Image (tube, grey):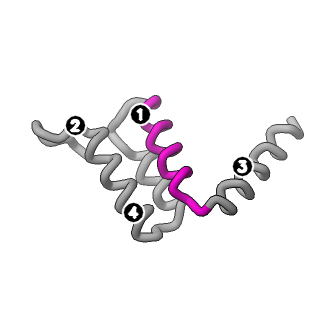
Amino acid sequence: MKATPTRPALTMCRDDVIGRMEQGQPFDEVENVIDLADVSEDQRAALWLMAFAMRDQGDQQRDARAHLALVAEH
């Protein structure tokens, strides 16, 4: 996703991610969009965190606990 002279890439990506989340697009598809975004790693991480926070709270907790369990095994 290339930025226009008046809209920075991060702004365009943020708006795209918000739109996709509000439309109910599956989180893994939104993650793929974020992975391909033409932004820095820090900006990509911030976009992911924003999208994660937009999910249902129960889904957030379930996935966070599953990830924690995976890293606890290593």
Mark 2: secondary structure: loop
Point out the tag, 3 or 4, that comes first from the N-terminus: 4
Residues at marks 1 and 3, CA–CA distance in whole angstroms: 21 Å
Q: Residues within 10 Å of mark 1 (few under 14, many from 20)?
A: some
Determine which residue is flagged by label 2. Answer: 8
Provide the residue span drawn in magenta.
Answer: 41-56
Is residue 55 shown left or right of residue 2? right
Residue 34 percent across, percent down from the top left: 43, 47
Is residue 56 shown left or right of residue 6? right
Residues at marks 3 and 4, CA–CA distance in whole angstroms: 21 Å
Determine which residue is flagged by label 1. Answer: 43
Q: Residue at x 44, y 43 (%)?
A: 47
Q: Decide: marks 2, 3 in contact (CB < 8 A)?
A: no
Q: Indicate the amino acid at tag 4.
A: Arg
Mark 1: secondary structure: helix
Residue 57 percent across, percent down from the top left: 64, 59
Q: Indicate the amino acid at tag 1.
A: Gln
Determine which residue is flagged by label 4. Answer: 20
